[in-house]
Image: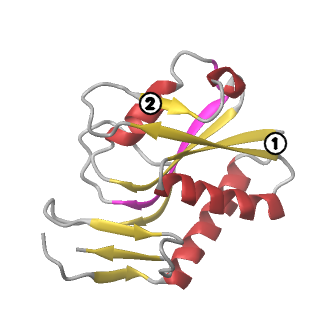
Amino acid sequence: MSDKKILVLNSRQVQQKINRIAYQLLEDNFEETEIILAGVVARGYRLATRLKSILEEIAPFKITLISIDLDKLSSSLNGSLSVPLEDCSNKVLILVDDVLNSGKALAYAFGIFLNIPLKKIRTVVLVDRNHKSFPIATDFTGLALSTVLKEHVDVVLDENGEEDAVYLR
C-alpha cells in the first residue's frame, strides 16, 4: 500500500455530502415520528452524529443516536449496541458507516436487527467503493468511488485536530 495520499474530498465537500444525505433522510422519513441513526463504531458513529445534528435543525421527528460495536475481523456476527435491542422495535432504522468496501460491516450490523420488527431499514455511507462481497446496497451515498482492491480509502472526521477529508492511498 502506498504512503502517498490523494485528496478525494476536502472539508467543505465532506460537509456538502453530509448535508445532502441529511436532507435525503428527511425526505425519506418526513411522515415518521422517530428514526434511529445507528452508527458503526468509530467513523460510522461520527458520521451518524453529524447527521443527527443537522437533522435536529431541519426535521420534525425525534432522532435517536445509537452505536454499533462490531468485531469486523470475526468470521461470525459479534456485535453490541449502546441501547437494548428492544428500544429499536417498530421504528425506522438507519445504518450508518463511513466506507462501504466489502459490505461485511453493514451486513453484520443488519444481522443484529433481524429478530425484531422494524418499520424499515436504510443504509448510509459517505463513500461506496463498489467492491462488495456481501449483498449490501446503500440507500444514501455521499460518493461512489471506483478503486482497485489494493487502494485504501481513509475518511477523517474530527480526528486528532485534522480537518475533515477523504483520502485515497
Mark toward the viewer: 2 or 1 = 2
Residue in the image at 57% along x and 42% along y: 67
- Quarter of the image with the C terminus is bottom left
Vertical placement of 125 versus 29: above or below?
A: below
Q: In this view, does 119 lie to the left or right of 127?
A: right
Q: Which mark is residue 31?
A: 1
Secondary structure under the numbered disc 1 in the rendered image: loop
Residue in the image at 24% along x and 65% along y: 152
Picture quarter containing residue 84?
top right
Q: Where is residue 70 in the image (x, y as percent from the top left)?
A: 41, 37
Q: How crowded is mark 2: few (under 14 residues within 10 Å), some or many (20 or more)?
A: some
Q: Do the residues labelled 2 and 1 touch (CB within 8 Å)?
A: no
Vertical placement of 132 versus 53: above or below?
A: above
Task: State yes or no: residue 144 in magenta.
Answer: no
Q: In this view, does 5 lie to the left or right of 39?
A: left
Relative depth, front residue between 25 and 76: 76
Residue extending farthest front: 160
Picture quarter containing residue 19?
bottom right
Relative depth, front residue between 101 and 164: 164
Q: Which mark is residue 79?
A: 2
Q: Which of marks 2 and 1 is nearer the N terminus?
A: 1
Q: Which amino acid does label 1 sit on?
A: Glu
Q: Position of residue 34 (x, y in %)?
A: 79, 39
Q: Give the range drawn in magenta.
A: 117-128
Q: How crowded is mark 1: few (under 14 residues within 10 Å), some or many (20 or more)?
A: few
Let me know if residue 123 appears in the view. yes
